[in-house]
Image (cartoon, grey):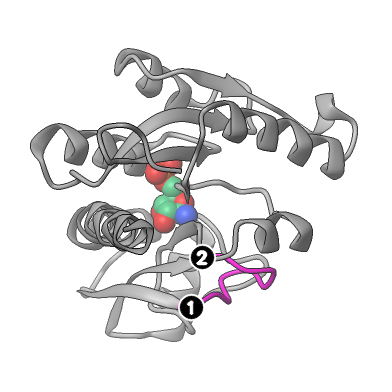
Amino acid sequence: MVDRNQKVNIAVLVSGGGTNLQAILDACGSGIITSGEVRVVISNKAGAYGLERAKKAGIPAFCITRKEAGSQEAFEEQVIEKLEEHEIGLIVLAGFLSILSEEFTSRYDHRIVNIHPSLIPSFCGSGYYGLKVHEAALAKGVKVTGATVHYVNEIPDGGEIIMQKAVEVKEGDTPEVLQRRVMEQAEWVIFPKTIEAVCAKILREKE
Ligand code: GRF
């Protein structure tokens, strides 16, 4: 949905540290994102630092866990309630580690974006998350990796690709070092840019 100032209301879903969330919030502040505004942050993990980042930025932040909800269905219902309450037009998965059901992803077709820390279709899909992605890239010996922003459908990391950026793998890289370089050079750069492009597209479609 579009608010009165012609911005798309964005929800960011996190599970952890939220450095991508921070990059998005900074991009809203610096004018890289002008077509959307973060209205709510939801974590599926209690104590996720992303919730603190949201609070510091004055954004409503909630924790909804599958365990407390009782089932995936109940969890998603509670998330949907929050999304509707905040009239959300774009859902951003920023290090959100729970797989969403097909009911959920089809309800928000082309309204959910995710960032994955590799060049899809390499090192993606079920089981490839966090450091595991970079461990796999190093084990394979690739010389270039990167990040991908894509729409989310029912297949993990399988939705339409929107933007990618390559990052060099260097001699002696550890998974941690590579993860940091991919974040700095790719994720924090292309995620805000993609979000702006997708929000602008949503606004154009409303005209
Ligand atoms: C990032 O590497 C992102 O690509 C992946 O999970 C990590 C989340 O990091 N989906 P953060 O919580 O944004 O710091």
Which residue sits at x=50%, y=54%?
130
Residue 161 point in image, percent of width and height? 42, 77
Separation of marks 2 and 1 at Cα, in angstroms: 9 Å
The x, y position of residue 104, in whole percent, is: 71, 54
Secondary structure that dominates the magenta span: loop
Depth check: give the residue in front, 42 or 176.
42
Q: Residue at x 83, y 43 (%)?
A: 72
Q: Is residue 94 above or below residue 153?
A: above
User: Which residue is the extreme one toward the right?
Assistant: 70
Which span is picked out in magenta? 152-160
Front one among 27 and 200:
200
The residue at which mark 1 appears reads as: 160
* Amino acid marked by disc 2: His
Q: Position of residue 53 (x, y in %)?
A: 36, 22
Mark in the foreground, 2 or 1 = 2
Q: The residue tagged with tag 1: helix, strand or loop?
A: loop
Look at mark 2 in the image and give the residue it sits on: 110
Q: Is residue 10 above or below residue 98?
A: above
For the view shown, which residue lies furthest in the left direction? 30
User: N-terminal of the two: label 2 or label 1?
Assistant: 2
